[in-house]
Amino acid sequence: MPRLTIHHKTEYRYARPVAFGEHRIMLRPRDGHDLRVVSGDLKIVPEPMRLRWIHDVFGNSVAIATFDERSDVLSFTWTATVDHNPAEEFALTPDDPAYFYPFLYDPEEFPDLLRFITPQYSDPNGELSTWARGFLDAEAPTPTYKILTQMTHGIREAFAYRSRHEHGTQHPLDTLQTGSGTCRDYALLMIEALRQLGIAARFVSGYLFVPSDSGHFGGGSTHAWVQVYLPSAGWIEFDPTNGIVGTRDLIRVAVARDPRQAIPLHGTYLGPADAFVGMEVEIRVVSADEAVET
């Protein structure tokens, strides 16, 4: 079982001391049978007046910091070590209820999956629906695994990765029409496309571990991908940015219905708008036996 260490530092700088509003920190990996947090340490400068941990509506760990001190620098340093046990790539058999698309969800599970099945973004001219249906075979039914893997690899191969400095995630139609976006944009596009097909999908925020001999995009930064729920298989990971199926190299931090619910670090400051100078982010994900400076 690989042991990995995550070092994530975000520092905000200001031209003069300012006061700080509440900050929400969503950086702690999400424990499960395939991922176990061995240790975690969060350092905040200046030290917050109060720091408390909660579980949000999806069960993600969120730290909430409040401050009573002014400063011209605000930094968050998160260091964690995890045991990562990647799940083997899933395989459906003809006996599984979701082997072919279309399939039906269990009536007992359907009410809990409904918000992950219902499209959240507008598609007034049916462009997204048409694109999603392009992954179906002309003669029904289509193997579900084929739809999911072809969409995952199709986005990676046909779209151009483009860093954006704007806040938030762009509308799926913008990603589709421009043929470009970030990992968060790709994830949202795939999620909404699958929802157009009636397949339950949700957003995942986390980290990508990239071995030194790998050519993947996104290493050394936060990352985003997709989980799809299939009867008898449960939630399965798909990364359309790197063409990964399963949890190989993916360190899950948070799951959400919408990307706006899984922002790694969010907060406000109290002061003039021109006081903000800039932000620096440093992220490393390495094997635990490699030296990591904190």
Image (cartoon, rainbow, N blue to C red):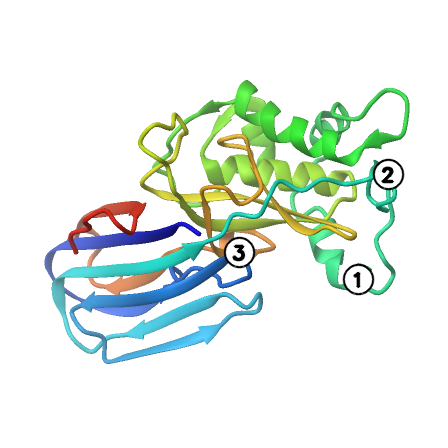
Residue ranking furthest to the front = 1
Residue ranking furthest to the left = 16
Which residue lies under the disc numbered 1? 109
- Pick the residue in front: 96 or 207: 96
Q: For the C terminus, give its image quadrant.
A: bottom left
Q: Earlier in the sequence, mark 2 or mark 1?
A: 2
User: Looking at numbered disc 3 in the image, what kind of residue is underneath it?
Assistant: Asp
Drawn side of residue 256 relative to residue 138, left or right: left
- Pick the residue in front: 124 or 77: 77
Q: Secondary structure at mark 1?
A: loop
The spot of residue 277 in percent (x, y) is 16, 48
- Pick the residue in front: 269 or 176: 176
The spot of residue 28 in percent (x, y) is 39, 62
Dot 3 surroundings within 10 Å: few (below 14), some, or many (20 or more)?
A: some
Distance between mark 2 and mark 1 Cα atoms: 21 Å
Drawn side of residue 162 relative to residue 7, left or right: right
- Quadrant for residue 196, please give it: top right
Looking at the image, which residue is at 66% across and 31% down?
149
Dot 2 surroundings within 10 Å: few (below 14), some, or many (20 or more)?
A: few
- From what the image shows, is residue 279 above or below residue 136? below
Which residue lies under the disc numbered 2? 94
User: Looking at numbered disc 1 in the image, what kind of residue is underneath it?
Assistant: Glu
The spot of residue 155 in percent (x, y) is 57, 26
What's the mark number on residue 34? 3
Looking at the image, which residue is at 47% across and 30% down?
181
